[in-house]
Image (cartoon, rainbow, N blue to C red):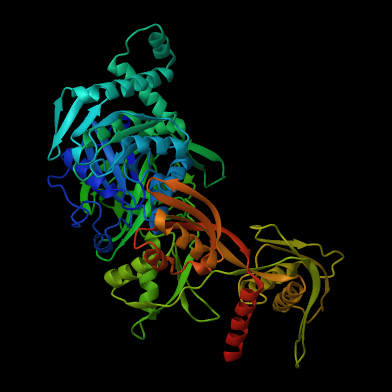
Amino acid sequence: MPFDIGSIRNVAVIAHGGAGKTSLVEAMLFDSGSIDRLGSALEGTTTTDFEPEEIQRKITIISSLAFLSWKDHRVNLMDTPGFINFIEDARGSLRVADGAVVIVSALSGVKGETEKLWNYVDEFNIPRVVFVNKMDRESASFLMALRDLEKVFGTEAIPLAMPLGEGEGLQGVVDLIGMKAYKFDGGMAVESEIPPEAKDAAGEYRKKLVEKAAEFDDALLEKYLEGGELSNEEIKRGLRKGSLERKYIPVICGSAVKNIGVHQLLDAMALCLASPADMAGIMPAKGKNPKDGSEIQRKPDEKEPFSAYVFKTIADPFAGKLSMFRVYSGTLKADSNAYNTVTGARERIGQIFYLQGKKQVPAQSVGPGEIAVVAKLKETNTGDTLSDESGPIVFDKMKFAEPMISYAIEPKSRGDEDKVSTGIQRILDEDPTLRFHRDEETKEMLISGMGQVHLEVTMERLKRKFGVEVLMKSPKIPYKETIKAAARAQGRYKKQSGGKGQYGDCWIEVEPLPKGGGFEFVNKVVGGAIPRQYIPAIEKGIVEAMREGITAGYPLVDIKVTVYDGSYHAVDSSEMAFKIAGSFAIKKAAVDARPIILEPVMKVEVTLPEESLGAVIGDLNSKRGKVQGMEQARGSQRVAALVPMAEMLTYATQLHSLTSGRGVYSMEFSSYEEVPAHIAQKLIAERQKKAEEK
């Protein structure tokens, strides 16, 4: 039986790696009675980190699902990765969430990954609650975390609960709405009066909270200004309205590992986060009619035609493909049919499940706002839309970031090439940030991903799931080529060797496009100098030659090509001849257009101990890095720099050495910039050497 839509909370738990997301999810499941034993992330016994690679590395690698009931609310939880190599997976989960719990450490405050995830939450207009974790740790500071939140995100942070003590003295929390203290013993909350030493601070926080609640509701504000006391229900009404409009940051605090403050967090999620019905008013579910392209909207109503978005796929060698989906309208029943509006396939729906980590819980039907899983859909992938065939809709597909780094791979055992390809294709189904292809020039199999750890984990999964081991060779930097000037050239292909000949002739002009401009092709041929049917062949020849590059074998980008003249032969001309002529023309023109090589430059953020600052900055400078700024964090420094990707491939090891293991960094793509002349010459020489070896 589908749940009442107003009671559903679809919540993504997000934070930087190591912040305690999985421990917090485990505590929520335990406190709600959904599980009867509290697992440990360190021991690898939690509900949501169950993949062997996660247990071994002690980090979340893929988003996983769990669910609980709390005070008449159905909460669907998504435990997401925070490690930078896997952070796009968290973004995929936020696509279907209606709320987010953002964990901030009471030790380190807001980290670079947290900012990135916060921006993802903004992208989808999702209300959020912040949980200040690790309040039980030495040097924890609730006040510091609040100030950091406000400083980084520019929004007022309003505690709904405050800590009773800090560090080893943490006893529990004060609920600032009900003005009661909750002391925790083994995760059990015992309600009591607020201790005398905490009353003043609680009073100050409470006053601020009531003012803020009144501010969001005109009737409450009028009552408050006239000196009237607001009831707890009125305060909750104002706080909920302000949270859904993202006018402030609701904050709870505690310790996930010691299960302190988790009850208050669950209450805050029910109060401050949106239901699917609320989100329909904030960000309606809009899509396109696949028949005519017109925009249509789906309301979260059982009477509407069924529609759902597939946001994640898991390739299971035993259970087959599992498709996770979010229902936006209508109802889906077990043992029924659904229509994939992207592929045009009619899919047979067998059993429907809720997931509690890896445990499957059967469901007879799922309604609006629900998140569930179905197995063995034959032609449905991540990003596809399922709907009623009589009322089709296509929701926009999620666009994930492009891969950052590539490695060449080869099987350890000869003859396993097909097994590698088959296994990786299955893994590609579940990880849209991976790319895999065979380089026609080098005959190498290339795998591309978000970082070295991402690709190492992929290879581990390939071995575990599909029984094939591979060797990874040094990464290839995705250099590109472009031009800096305009030039003209003729491409002429003539072949006569008995029988029908080949003839194609074209004149083109090339000119640079702005950075990120891609490729533009313009036909300005007049007077029939080249028949219209041969123009696409010229473009095809140009595009294929651009893939091979001009000077160093890297793809040619950001270029406009105009074909403006040429000639043809009534008998000997063909599409193939003009395709070859087009490739000749672009190669000649680009050489005269001041070709340059571009390299990917990364935005790097390093957090390090104060005493390592000089060594780290010196090292970044030696890597052709440009330091963009420094910021003092609590007990550490944060350095932002732009550094070429080629210089960052082994940075994790180097930073570990420079900072005695205390430094951490995050890295994301920034832009493509021109390679210095001496490096360009080296790349060109390598290309020539390979050509000679062939």
Q: Residue furthest bottom?
A: 498
**How far across and down, in percent of the image, does residue 428 sit?**
40, 64
Task: Identify the image quadrant of the C terminus.
Answer: bottom right
Q: Residue furthest top?
A: 226
**How far across and down, in percent of the image, does residue 644 sit?**
55, 65
Task: Identify the image quadrant of the N terminus.
Answer: top left
**How far across and down, in percent of the image, does residue 590 sit?**
73, 72
Q: Which residue is painted at 54% across and 62% down in the image? A: 643
Q: Nearer the viewer, residue 503 or 86?
A: 86
Q: Nearer the viewer, residue 124 or 26?
A: 26
Q: Which residue is painted at 56% across and 64% down in the image? A: 600
Left or right placement of residue 79 versus residue 557 in this view: left
Q: Which residue is painted at 50% across and 63% down in the image? A: 618
Q: Nearer the viewer, residue 581 or 630?
A: 630
Left or right placement of residue 265 versus residue 283 in this view: left
Q: Quadrant of residue 568?
A: bottom right
Q: Is residue 366 visible?
A: no
Q: Is residue 288 visible?
A: yes
**How far across and down, in percent of the image, does residue 620 sit?**
51, 63
Q: Vertical placement of 194 versus 67: above or below?
A: above
Q: Quadrant of residue 661?
A: bottom left
Q: Vertical placement of 53 versus 240: above or below?
A: below
